[in-house]
Amino acid sequence: MDRTASKTSLRQLIAMIAALAFPVALQNLLTTTGSMIDTMMIASLGEKSVGAVGLCAQFSSLMFSSYWGFVGGGMLFFAQYWGAQNHDGIRRSYGLTLSFMLIPGILFGYFAIMHPELVMALYTDSPDIRAIGILYLQIVGFSYPLQVIASAMAALLRSIERVKIPMVSGIASVVTNCICNYILIFGKLGLPAMGVRGAALGTVIANLVNVLIMALLIHKNRIPYVLEFRSHFRWSIALIRDYIQKCFPILLNEVFIGIGNTMINIVLGHQVDEAIAATAVLRTLEGMVIGFFGGFSSAASVLVGKEVGAGNHEEAYSRGWRLIYLCCGMIGIVGLCLIALHTPILHMMGLSGPSFRIATGMLIIYCSVALIRMQNWCMNDTYRSAGDSAFGSLLEILFMFLLVQPIIHIANDVFHAPFLLVFLLCYVDEPIRYVMMQHHMYSKKWTQPVSSEGIATIGAFREKYHIGPTMQESIAAWKAGHLRKPKT
């Protein structure tokens, strides 16, 4: 039977979301702002320096894609074990998550430091940009393992509802990065001007500050799990198997969607100059919106995953669908504000004439589509935290390559459609996936606990709502001989 005696009221749910989402959203927005300031500083060194650092950022993004699947899988286990108060499970799954994440962090750091010329050769043929990028990578590579450690620590702290600590350390990191970049790039306080090497060193120092402050606050507040090193590596074969099974779809999602978005950006990047400028500004605004709703989605994951882990599946389902519609309401408000203020915002970002008109059209399209797109995103993260990491991930990959990619390339390359129509077609899959994601939500099949407490009550929950076995369970049962292969 479900353990929940009473449902969380809407007012209580909004208060929980605010407490968890606001610190994450604030940290994301400050990080985005800090990145914009860094770009402005590097821009003073010339276009080649901006281009070189931008290409190095693509290498960093590739590393991010390679380890973020483990963050998503880790948060699934952290949140569910937190709801079940399985402290040993949290420690072991954290050690497993950190170990898997460090593999790409160390590997990418090695190539950046030891073989930067190979990395730059992948991205550009320009000797000047290569030379600048090599100088940057040789230093910034030391920040990659630190970035991975900070991401793992922050994921665990958010999952156990201690979001203020990564927020404080993140703010300190952004401030440190801006100050160090100013001093080191331009040679202030009697130090030599280091140019892009100063920007790289500032990034390393900022990531070190992030890890150290987080560790100090964890120790000061006596928060368990993160610093209990001896308990991190007591893994069982079952835990490793379940962990990889849950992480694999998320890893596929990150890698293939990253490739798909790169292909889309290539199409959008081969347009007239005004459209390219408008796209650059739109991506900046999109990053700020995603940064804010990343906090909302992270909070939704914790609030749902915790209840699934505790065996409160009725409450998890109730929270899940309400959080998704809250997301719709919030993105509607944000979208209306952006459209209402688009003139001063776009002028402030240097757009006028044709580029302003194109950006206005893009912003209206994006804000309209975001009503559905952000709900899809929130549903996918909710399903993952509840144990279903496959459905939303595989759906997104299939639609990206079977629908979105063919249709935008045909529209752009064959029919030479107007730019705004091509941009709109980039989101053609969102309404279709929304219908399928909504159907999956109300089917309740996404509730797939990994904790013993959640597993103990899932049978009664499925029986009550006549929920059949999941695809993974059917395959496992077939392999175990419980299902017979149909005769042909």
Image (spheres, rainbow, N blue to C red):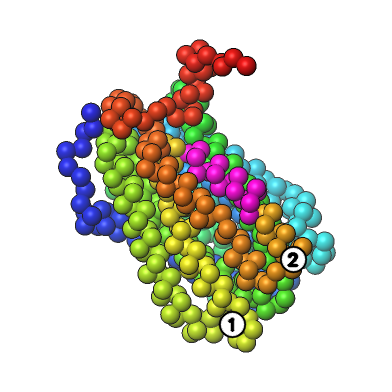
Give the residue at mark 1. 356
Against 122, residue 469 (above or below) is: above
- Looking at this view, name the residue that lies furthest to the front: 488
Mark 1 Cα shell of 10 Å, populated few (<14), some (14-19), many (≥20): many
Q: Amino acid at mark 2?
A: Phe
Q: Amino acid at mark 1?
A: Phe
Residue in the picture at 52% in, 55% down: 430
Q: Is residue 397 left or right of residue 160?
A: right
Q: Magenta segment, principal secondary structure?
A: helix
User: Which one is nearer the viewer's eye here, 403 or 147?
Assistant: 403
Q: Secondary structure at mark 1?
A: helix
Quarter of the figure with the N terminus: top left
User: Which one is nearer the viewer's eye here, 196 or 76?
Assistant: 76
Q: Residue 184's quadrant in the figure?
A: bottom right
Give the residue at mark 2. 415
Span colored in magenta: 389-404
Percent across and percent down for residue 16 are 27, 54
Mark 2 Cα shell of 10 Å, populated few (<14), some (14-19), many (≥20): few
Residue in the picture at 42% in, 59% down: 293
Is residue 97 magenta-colored? no
User: Which one is nearer the viewer's eye here, 197 or 121?
Assistant: 121
Residue in the picture at 75% in, 57% down: 123
Quarter of the figure with the C terminus: top right
User: Which one is nearer the viewer's eye here, 187 or 400?
Assistant: 400
Percent across and percent down for residue 397 are 59, 46
Percent across and percent down for residue 270 are 74, 68
Does residue 293 appear in this view?
yes
Residue in the picture at 74% in, 52% down: 119
